[in-house]
Image (tube, grey):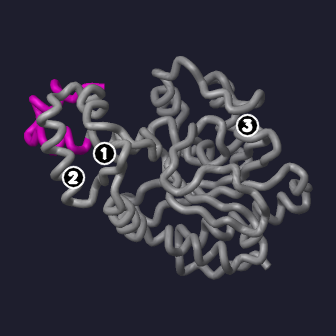
Amino acid sequence: MTTDALSDRGPAPAVTRAIAILGLLADAHGAPLSLSEIARALGIAKSSTSNLCVALEDGGMIQRTDGGYTLGRRNLELGGAFLRSFDQVREFYKLCAESPVLSHELLQLAVLDGTNVLYLARHEGRAPLRLSATIGDRFPAAPTAIGNALLANLEPEEVAERFSHVSEWPRLTEKSVQTLDALQAKLAATRERGYSLDEGEVFPSVVGIAMPIPPRSSGDVPMAMGASMFRTDDSADHRDRVVEALRSAVERLSNPMVLTSDR
């Protein structure tokens, strides 16, 4: 990954390169990168890289360790401020805690990011389920219930365009969707059913159910809310209760003036 061409054309080359450094460290998933590794990965001079890293470290965006550089705590503060700007994130946690059905489940809130989903919030529930992605993680949208709920809101032509560059589909389990036609069929079923369903496409023993959240205004970022449970807990009666509780929750998240109950 190099930024020379982009940074030379941009209005603020140093900012462009600093952002690239943050992205590189984020992709390292906590593993420290040395100054030489950063400079080599970005294709910029080591002296320039050093100046950028000093500035980022002074701002708390990165921190120096024995093994090199990692992301700094300031990113967490900025990320928290970003999440707090979404009213639905705050309301999500309140609804999860209050619902007699959903409070027991592992629940997530996510937005679409290309062909991936980006997780904004997570409620642990009471079930010992620790397999799913956490806040800030990106996951392939095609096999996930929450990704399908978001993709189903798009026209089939837009879905096809979004996945036109995908040459190798992620195979998380043997059931993971592997073609655009298969994905389009799943999305059509999701639209007809009113919610998306992942039966072992991400983890063999886990079932996922998700629904899109109707935006409060035209400028809102589309979101979806999903629940994950062990297949052993997925009886028809329990699934029906979760679906109804999710439907009530997304209605509240879309319109806080709605009075609903899943008791």
* Dominant SS in magenta: helix
**Which image quadrant is residue 103 in?**
bottom right
Q: What is the CA distance from the residue labelled 3 to the residue labelled 2?
A: 40 Å
| Label 1 secondary element | helix
**Front-lying residue, 131 or 88:** 131
Q: Earlier in the sequence, mark 3 or mark 2?
A: 2
Q: Earlier in the sequence, mark 2 or mark 1?
A: 1
Q: Which residue is mark 3?
A: 201
Q: What is the CA distance from the residue labelled 1 to the residue labelled 3?
A: 32 Å
Q: Which residue is mark 2?
A: 56
Residue 192 placement, left or right of 2: right
Q: Amino acid at mark 2?
A: Leu
The quarter of the rendered structure image containing the N terminus is top left
| Label 2 secondary element | helix
**CA neighbours of label 3 inside 10 A, class few (<14), some (14 to 19), many (20+):** many
Mark nearest the camera among 3 and 2 is 2
Give yes or no for contact between labels 2 and 1 (Cβ–Cβ under 8 Å). yes
Q: Which residue is mark 1?
A: 22
Q: Which residues are magenta?
A: 1-19
